[in-house]
């Protein structure tokens, strides 16, 4: 609905809901001019980089998991892999498969939580998933089935859904039993149709019409769609090795935030499903590509609300790639779970594609095997500046269109939610 | 909802998160196949992680996270004043959890390490019970969803919840697991409260004590066993300190 252009707008959302952690949105428009527009990160810090100091390398991946309850598998993997890269440990093929399967389970779990529990209520005009249980039971059934498979896969490959304990330095604590793999494969086959139902449910949704061109950062694929390690790339043509992660993130502090912000070639960049989709489209599983086509998506996309649809495409990628990995693992004669290692003074970095984007852990380790220094660069921390710039552009556009305050407020909140921010994680 | 012909009360529930990873809150929303049944038993009036609705007054408050700032303290006191029953939820709320590892260093050092010169509001890491009385402590890092569902059933039925008093070893033996200590893996199962179904030893990872001490834990024997298995003092000390679960540190004095 359109109103007089000069209507003043004053929006204050304290602790925006249906996102992980605590953030505020403040918007003020007077005489058609944007006076204030800020994305404030008000989460209390836990000082993880300090907490790591003096811990043994054995404890580090367990502490790393506690950075985030939702993407704990990514944090544990980034941590254990940074240590292994420092020590020069090559893990067995079986452990590599188990880790990627755990990673995929987390991506599916996290994306499904976001799409069905955090985003769907906006699209259906309600405050939460709770009323949808009565009004849209079929949607809840889809969400439940997908999440149940993802939880079971996490249990099998990571030990549980949050805070995995199986990723030990050198590999994994055990090989999943054949009977467990067979049963999970059956479960996956039963879950797949529900994912196709999800595609039907999300196919015709109306996402706000808003575009802002930005730089997209992710792991760089070589014809694949990587989640664990490799080169770092940006859509502006930057390519760096994992060890150069600091030159890729350039963290800085801002006044209204306990999280650090990041930049690369421009004032801000984006990480996450949309960046991976834009940068590595060619490497998607053929079925995920087919889904992208059905959704009318081609790389590249500059509408940040399409993070949601890129996540849906990734759900197909991880589910169908998991199926192939499980098939291989069932027949694999490889039983070696971990490589032995020797402690020495070293430094190590690892980049992992967490559900919300590229994540880095760095450790300096002394000759006793204790952590001397740690650094974690979190996906949402890298997205904060981009969220801020998107918000400014969005509010300017909507004000020019003469949109009502309530509409602007909802679109702003939906924009923040589209990034699926993990705020306590970004502050850590 | 009726049970054996008796109408059950439907308490109003709120969920709040302080300094932590929100992993416990996530567990509350995680076992989706049971969520519908759960919402039959309780009415969720405030749960920011999953809902933008704030429907006012509540009877039961689940509080996750440690308390680290003055504004946290004020917010927690307001929750205590409103809630008939306050459940400290998860290791950060019950024990301080891993947040307590920060307490090994002076706060200004931690601020300088992470933020340099930048000013940051923070304070001492406190458990919920350090600030206000907690009626129930639901342990674990993260909490067990099954135990949470059990707890809700007890509360709705008006039964005082009895958490296991025995150690994780009991559950491990029930599952006929091989003892991880015999595989050379350090484990705090003998002194840690059960209820997690021995999820870590089951995955050959050893227990880190996230659920706090079992009743009448025998610290002397544990240390003796760990020494017999060749674990170093530093290794044992790190393990028992990790979640701040044995505060007052009943194990460390034994080590000395």
Image (cartoon, grey):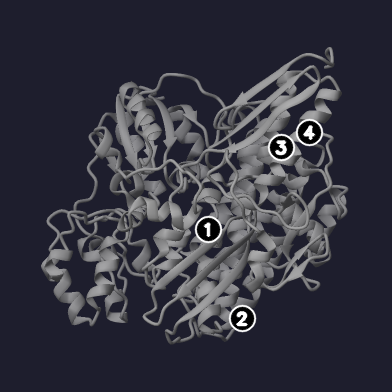
Q: Is residue A408 above or below residue A198?
A: above
Q: Chain of mark 1?
A: A
Answer with the quarter of the image where residue B109 lies.
bottom left
Q: Nearer the viewer, residue B175 or B141?
A: B141
How packed mark 3 is, by other alpha carbons closer than 10 Å (few <14, some 14-19, many 20 or more), is many
Q: Nearer the viewer, residue A353 or B218?
A: A353
How packed mark 2 is, by other alpha carbons closer than 10 Å (few <14, some 14-19, many 20 or more), is few
Mark 3 vs mark 2: same chain? yes
Mark number, residue A152 = 1
Q: Chain of mark 4?
A: A
Tell me whether circle 4 and circle 3 mark residues in contact (CB < 8 Å): yes
Label 1 to label 4, Cα distance in Å?
40 Å
Mark number, residue B189 = none
Mark 2 and mark 4 lie on one chain; the one further toward the N terminus is 2
Q: Which residue is mark 4?
A: A394
Q: Chain of mark 3?
A: A
Label 2 to label 4, Cα distance in Å?
52 Å
Which residue is located at x 79 percent, y 66 percent? A238
**Secondary structure category for the residue under label 3:** helix
Q: Which residue is mark 2?
A: A331
Q: Pick the quarter of the image with the C terminus of chain B.
A: bottom left
Which residue is located at x 49 percent, y 46 percent? B31
Label 3 to label 2, Cα distance in Å?
45 Å
Mark 1 and mark 4 lie on one chain; the one further toward the N terminus is 1
Q: Residue B176: horizontal and vertical position, in percent?
A: 30, 70
In the picture, measured across the screen, residue B48 lies left or right of residue B136, that is: right
Tell me whether circle 3 and circle 2 mark residues in contact (CB < 8 Å): no
Label 1 to label 2, Cα distance in Å?
20 Å
Q: Which residue is mark 3?
A: A415
């Amino acid at each position: 609905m359109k109103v007089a252009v000069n209507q003043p707008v004053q929006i204050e959302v304290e602790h925006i809901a249906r996102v992980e952690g605590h953030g505020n949105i403040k918007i003020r428009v007077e005489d058609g001019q944007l006076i204030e527009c800020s994305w404030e990160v008000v989460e209390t810090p836990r000082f993880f980089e300090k907490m790591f100091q003096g811990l043994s390398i054995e404890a580090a991946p367990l502490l790393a998991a506690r950075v985030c309850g939702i993407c704990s598998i990514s944090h544990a993997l980034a941590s254990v892999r940074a240590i292994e890269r420092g020590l020069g440990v090559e893990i067995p093929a079986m452990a590599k498969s188990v880790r990627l399967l755990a990673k995929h389970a987390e991506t599916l779990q996290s994306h499904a939580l976001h799409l069905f529990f955090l985003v769907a209520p906006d699209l259906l005009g309600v405050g939460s998933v709770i009323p949808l249980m009565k009004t849209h039971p079929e949607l809840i059934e889809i969400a439940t089935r997908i999440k149940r498979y993802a939880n079971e896969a996490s249990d099998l490959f990571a030990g549980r859904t949050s805070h995995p304990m199986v990723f030990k330095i050198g590999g994994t604590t055990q090989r999943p039993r054949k009977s467990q793999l067979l049963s999970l494969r059956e479960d996956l086959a039963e879950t797949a149709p529900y994912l196709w139902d999800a595609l039907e449910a999300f196919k015709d949704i109306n996402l706000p019409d808003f575009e802002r061109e930005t730089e997209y950062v992710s792991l760089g694929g070589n014809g694949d769609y990587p989640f664990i390690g490799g080169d770092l790339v940006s859509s502006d043509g930057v390519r760096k090795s994992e060890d150069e992660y600091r030159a890729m993130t350039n963290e800085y502090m801002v006044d209204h935030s306990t999280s650090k912000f990041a930049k690369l070639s421009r004032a801000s960049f984006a990480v996450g499903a949309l960046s991976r989709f834009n940068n590595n489209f060619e490497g998607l599983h053929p079925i995920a590509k087919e889904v992208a086509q059905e959704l009318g998506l081609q790389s590249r996309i500059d509408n940040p609300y399409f993070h949601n649809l890129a996540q849906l495409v990734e759900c197909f990628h991880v589910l169908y790639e998991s199926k192939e990995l499980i098939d291989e693992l069932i027949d694999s004669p490889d039983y070696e779970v971990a490589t032995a290692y020797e402690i020495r003074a070293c430094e190590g970095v690892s980049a992992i594609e967490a559900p919300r984007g590229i994540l880095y852990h760095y450790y300096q380790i002394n000759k006793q095997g204790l952590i001397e220094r740690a650094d974690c660069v979190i996906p949402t921390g890298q997205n904060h500046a981009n969220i801020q710039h998107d918000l400014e552009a969005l509010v300017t556009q909507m004000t020019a269109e003469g949109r009502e305050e309530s509409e602007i407020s909802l679109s702003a909140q939906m924009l923040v939610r589209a990034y699926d921010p993990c705020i306590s994680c970004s502050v850590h | 909802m009726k049970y054996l012909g008796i109408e059950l009360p439907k308490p109003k529930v709120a969920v709040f998160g302080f300094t932590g990873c929100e992993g416990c809150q996530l567990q509350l929303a995680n076992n989706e196949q049971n969520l519908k049944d759960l919402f039959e038993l309780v009415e969720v009036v405030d749960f920011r992680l999953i809902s933008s609705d704030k429907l006012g007054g509540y009877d039961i408050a689940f509080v996750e996270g440690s308390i680290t700032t003055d504004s946290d303290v004020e917010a927690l006191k307001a929750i205590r004043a409103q809630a008939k029953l306050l459940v400290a939820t998860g290791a950060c709320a019950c024990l301080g959890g891993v947040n307590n590892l920060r307490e090994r260093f002076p706060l200004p050092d931690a601020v300088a390490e992470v933020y340099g010169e930048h000013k940051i509001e923070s304070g001492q890491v406190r458990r919920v019970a350090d600030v206000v009385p907690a009626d129930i402590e639901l342990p674990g890092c993260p909490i067990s969803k099954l135990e949470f569902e059990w707890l809700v059933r007890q509360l709705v039925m008006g039964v005082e919840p009895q958490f296991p008093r025995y150690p994780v070893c009991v559950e491990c033996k029930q599952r006929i697991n091989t003892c991880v200590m015999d595989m050379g893996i350090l484990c705090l199962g003998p002194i840690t409260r059960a209820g997690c179904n021995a999820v870590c030893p089951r995955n050959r990872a050893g227990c880190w004590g996230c659920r706090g001490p079992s009743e009448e834990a025998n610290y002397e024997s544990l240390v003796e066993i760990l020494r017999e298995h060749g674990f170093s003092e530093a290794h044992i000390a790190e393990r028992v300190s990790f979640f701040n679960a044995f505060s007052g540190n009943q194990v460390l004095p034994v080590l000395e």
